Amino acid sequence: MAEKKRKKSKFSIKKLIYNDKYLIIISIVLAVIVWIVTSMSLSPETTKTITVSLPVDFSDSAAEQLGLKCYGDEVVDVDVTVSCKKYLAKDITADNFKVSLQTNVVTSSGNFDVPIRVETGENVDFTISSYYPTVYRAYFDVEDEKTMDLDVRYTNEDFIEKGYTMGQPLLSESTVTVKGPRSYVSQVKTVSADVTIEEKLKTTTSMDLNAIALDSYGSKVNYVTIEKGAENLTITIPVLKEMQLNVSASFVGKPSKINTDSFAVSYSVSKVNAGVLEDAKITEAVIGDIDFSQLKPGENKFTFDVQSLDGFVILDNIKEISATVTIPKTYKSERISVNAGNVNVINAPKGYNVSVTDISASAVMVIGTESNLNGLTASNIKLVVDLSGIDVNNIKEGISSYKIVTTLENSDTCWIYGDYTANVNITKA
């Protein structure tokens, strides 16, 4: 019985062949296999172009050892064209290629065509038909740099509205550094930035600048870069309102109870044509400060440089304006004796001894009306030497001269005239 069962379960190819259901399945499988094999073997040839990025690197090369720097593109895109079966094309990527530069050809300064080499890995099912570019073109030289003034050129001059004028333009950087190959840096004669303004300006305007290195013929110099301190190179063009202003000066160091209306003040020029910042609300041409410490009874003359003033510019052809201040005869002068012991030294450097050896005058001149001068003594005179400005890392020992700051205490109607100095001895403690 067991033997009979074994005979029934024995596999029979004959039965399988004559079984329609199994025969159909086997036929389909075989047909698919044949179709795949045939398709692969008979697949048409095609081409494909892949872009491979090549970082430019001349480290560990002869050029680097010679101190030569490469001036050209930092990355080159190499287009590689391959021939392959059509069904393989989609699987070919940039990772299948090794692209490199033959850096050993660069052995001196100058222009070089450095060959580009493209290779594939092992056991690939495609061939390289061509690639482009085949060389990397660049200039090689020792790096150099120089600092130059920035020259601003206006492509059109008439860009200020009528009734306004242009102040002194302000650059974010007045100088720039030209950097690049030595032979090209030496060709740079100017660094220029063009400014083009199409509309009429009535307000102060700022804009970015594009600086270009030019040779003696006005042509752009290649391979050089322009480095600047600020992130963006800018120019600010102040636009000023044209006005006529009365000339005046300010008093500084004035005792609180003195009325300067009694002083006669005259100017070499009483009115000026000026360009004024409208937002500054300027109503007078203040040409400078007159310090009370420089005023004595009688006539006092001061000269001011008016070529650079805050908030406005004088449009007239005037470089200086003088002011004459006449102190009334009711004011007198009186000398009050002082000595080195009256001088107080403050902010002495740590670790040093300081002492006043002598002062430039044995008396200070005090100005005021006769009644106000009465009763003033040396106790009203405060003399101070401030050493806070000394460079603590470079202190000079010995005797040096320092300015005395003078103050008249307990008096708001008189002032001290003149400048005074003290000789101060500084020694290591």
Image: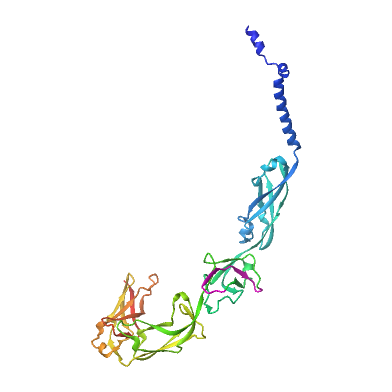
Percent coordinates x, y for residue 395 in the rendering: 38, 73
In this picture, residue 208 sits left or right of residue 127: left
Return the x and y of residue 103 as percentages of the image width and height: 66, 55
Q: Nearer the viewer, residue 314 or 50?
A: 314
Please name whichever residue, 94 or 386, is drawn nearer the observer in this view of the structure. 94
- Farthest front residue in view: 162
In this figure, which colouring scheme has been used for the structure? Answer: rainbow
Q: Which residue is painted at 72% across and 41% down in the image?
A: 86
What percent of the width, then of the height, locates residue 377? 24, 85
> Per the image, is 213 magenta?
yes
The quadrant the C terminus occupies is bottom left
Q: Nearer the viewer, residue 361 or 129?
A: 129
| Image location of residue 64, percent across then percent down | 61, 58
Q: Is residue 243 above or below residue 131?
A: below
Q: Which image quarter holds the N terminus?
A: top right
Residue 150's quadrant in the figure? bottom right
Residue at left offset 66%, top offset 47%: 97
- Most extreme residue toward the left is 375
Q: Which residues are magenta?
A: 200-217
Task: Assess whether residue 50 is covered by the magenta stretch.
Answer: no
Q: Residue at x 64, y 52 (%)?
A: 53
Which is more toward the observer, 392 or 198? Answer: 198
